[in-house]
Amino acid sequence: MACLPWSIGNALATDTPVDPALRDRVAAQSQKLDAMRSKVAEQAAQLEDMKRALAQQEAEFNDLRKAVGLSALDTSRAGSLAASGQSAAPTSSSSGAPQAPTQDTVAQTSGPVGKAPATADRPPEVAPIFDQPGVLTPKGKLIVEPSYQYGYSSSDRVALVGYTVIPAILIGLIDVRQVKTTTQTAAIAARYGLTNRMELEVRVPYADGHTDTISREIFTGTAQDNLFTSSGKGIGDVEATLRYQLNDGGADKPYYVGWFRAKSRTGRDPFEVTTDCVTRCVENATGTGLPLQLPTGTGFYSAQAGVTWLYPSDPVVFFGNLSYLHNFTRYNVSRNVLLAGKQYLGTVKAGDIADVSVGMGLALNEKASISIGYDQSFVGRVEQNGQPLAGSARSVLGSLLIGGSYRFSDKRTLNITLGVGVTRDTPDTTVTVRLPMTL
């Protein structure tokens, strides 16, 4: 009796007929499910391989960006986007898996992966306030830079000839002179990029100077001021400069640019002009007299070597310059004296000049930037026939420099520099305007 239900169920199952078409359909569906499971497993394996390849490419891409210094650039761009109310593209998804950079993002950064941008190894561009530009000329490019410089200086001189009886009482004569000098220099410079790290510059100046000397001369016994005026203009000393970038530099890494300058004496030198020593000199008591015409050159061949450094530190760029100028000795020198012919001077050696300058530049936006700096020169004594010239002393020239730059386009930039004399021997005011143009 216990086995009766099982026997009945088997009998019913055995007797129930099964449709062959349904059996074939079930078998086909089973095979299809197995094929789909195999395909899903295969695609999952391929997806894992693609994720690993993507992660490796992103790691290589980030290494390249760090190598060319684009990480700091993106940080500054992100700050600009936040200030303008825009949002930067996300670098990862909500699940934490890294995403590949989009085509637009790559195009905005540096171009094709694995190739550094053309300007990545060049120094940053700042408003130039020294003689050395901050950016070298690219290979094969020519930059023509017209410039204009205006300078004004004034100095007072008091010479006492006599003796004192008691303090503050002088018995004798007093020579008081006030000298006002105005100089204007127009120049044209051409810079050509020999390589991406080397450029050659040639500069041709045209100088125009004017000096007014107001004095009450000794031995005249008069209280009336006398005015002595002299001027001169013409081509100045032509010079050539070769610059070479010594290292790659980068974000938070300094750039070093070494340079060498050679200066001719194509301008009219101080020994060629005629000195008025008849109406101005009385028994040589007031010195050697004043020139009737101002020179336009120094009168000496010179060679100058130096190094310029730039250190970008967002959002500013620090820069400086260190140089030494050597004036070559001139032999058998003579000067022209009014109504007295030539006066033989012998061997003359102008003092060498050591110069140091520091500054910083700040970009206000993509077109405008400002710079501020300080320049100081140490000038040696003049020697005649191997001995220091009487009345010649070492001098220190210090100038506070403020400059601004505005870029009209990729080929036109306006640079203006204001120099204020800090020491007594430095010109009171110097204004320089430059307009470099890429051809």
Image: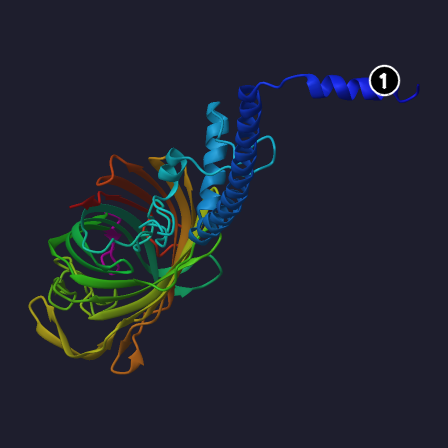
Q: Is residue 365 visible?
A: no
Q: Nearer the viewer, residue 59 or 31?
A: 31
> In the structure shown, which secondary structural element does the residue marked by tag 1 occupy?
helix
SS majority, magenta? loop
User: Residue 158 sits in which quadrant?
Assistant: bottom left
Give x and y (percent) for residue 154.
30, 49
Name the residue furthest right: 1
Q: Is residue 142 above or below residue 240?
A: above
Amino acid marked by disc 1: Pro
User: Residue 260 sits in which quadrant?
Assistant: bottom left
Q: Is residue 18 visible?
A: yes
Give x and y (percent) for residue 251.
46, 51
> At 52% from the left edge and 34% from the top edge, which residue is drawn?
35
Q: Nearer the viewer, residue 253 or 10?
A: 10
User: Residue 73 sits in which quadrant?
Assistant: top left
Give x and y (percent) for residue 210.
18, 50
Q: Nearer the viewer, residue 306 or 244?
A: 244
> At 12% from the left edge and 58% from the top edge, which residue is drawn?
292
Q: Which residue is mark 1?
A: 5
Q: Quadrant of the N terminus?
A: top right
91 lies left or right of 327? right
The colour style of the image is: rainbow
262 lies left or right of 92? left
Residue range in magenta is 214-224
> At 39% from the left edge and 59% from the top edge, which residue is drawn?
248
Does the magenta segment cover residue 219? yes
Mark 1 closeness class: few <14, some 14–19, many ≥20 residues within 10 Å: few
